[in-house]
Image (cartoon, rainbow, N blue to C red):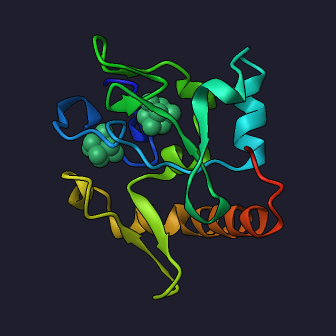
Amino acid sequence: MVERNSARDGSFEKLRCDICESSCCVETEMTLTKKDAERIDALGYKRLEYLIKGSDNFCELRNIDGHCFFYDPETKLCKIYEARPDGCRYYPVVYNARKRKCVLDDDCPLREKVSRQEMRKVCHKVKKNVETLMMEAQRSDGAC
Ligand code: SF4
Ligand code: SF4
């Protein structure tokens, strides 16, 4: 199994990121909490290299040559897999604040491989992550 996104945790057993042709690591818009950035900083990376301030004060992973700063296009691996942002960990499960529920993101071509049970298992964590992101963005004291 390719170590790219959620697959290796065992939380999404049938999600085969290794056969995915439209990786979520390409042109990523993944947002990071302060805690995510602290975990990545501990590996020796500098926030100026890997973070950008996106819209509405959200801090996002920087793209280089059309892919996430941490994505290696040759090996198709995430260089910081163990320390990747929580949003990457839970993807393709995302929280739709307007509908107030977890959904599977349309951009993941293999989203139907994630079962309802698996989605339910991580939903509270996904929701909490979104709440933290929103709070940090409002206070302007987030990762970037
Ligand atoms: S888009 Fe879906 S299947 Fe593709 S790498 Fe991301 S999580 Fe895996
Ligand atoms: S941090 Fe890793 S899993 Fe997340 S978008 Fe970047 S390469 Fe993909």
- Say whether residue 96 is left or right of residue 40: left
Q: Which image quadrant for residue 35?
A: top right
In which quadrant will I find the N terminus? top left
Q: Position of residue 47 (x, y in %)?
A: 70, 29
In the displayed structure, does residue 52 sit left or right of residue 115?
right
Return the residue nearer the eye: 42 or 61.
61
Q: Is residue 8 visible?
A: no
Q: Is residue 128 left or right of residue 74?
A: right
Residue 24 visible in the current orientation: yes
Q: Quadrant of residue 22?
A: top left
- Residue at x 56% of width, y 46% of height: 60
Q: Position of residue 81 (x, y in %)?
A: 52, 26
Residue at left offset 44%, top offset 49%: 29
Please state the total of marks drawn on the protein image.
0
Judge left or right: residue 56 versus residue 99: right
Q: Pick whichever, 56 or 76, lies toward us.
A: 56
User: Which residue lies most toward the bottom here?
Assistant: 99
Q: Position of residue 73 (x, y in %)?
A: 30, 18
139 over 27 or under it: above or below? below
Please tell me whether residue 53 is drawn above or below residue 133 in the rendered image.
above
**Residue 97, how many percent across, how many down?**
53, 81
Position of the C terminus, as image quadrant, is top right
Give the residue at x 77% y 52%.
Answer: 142
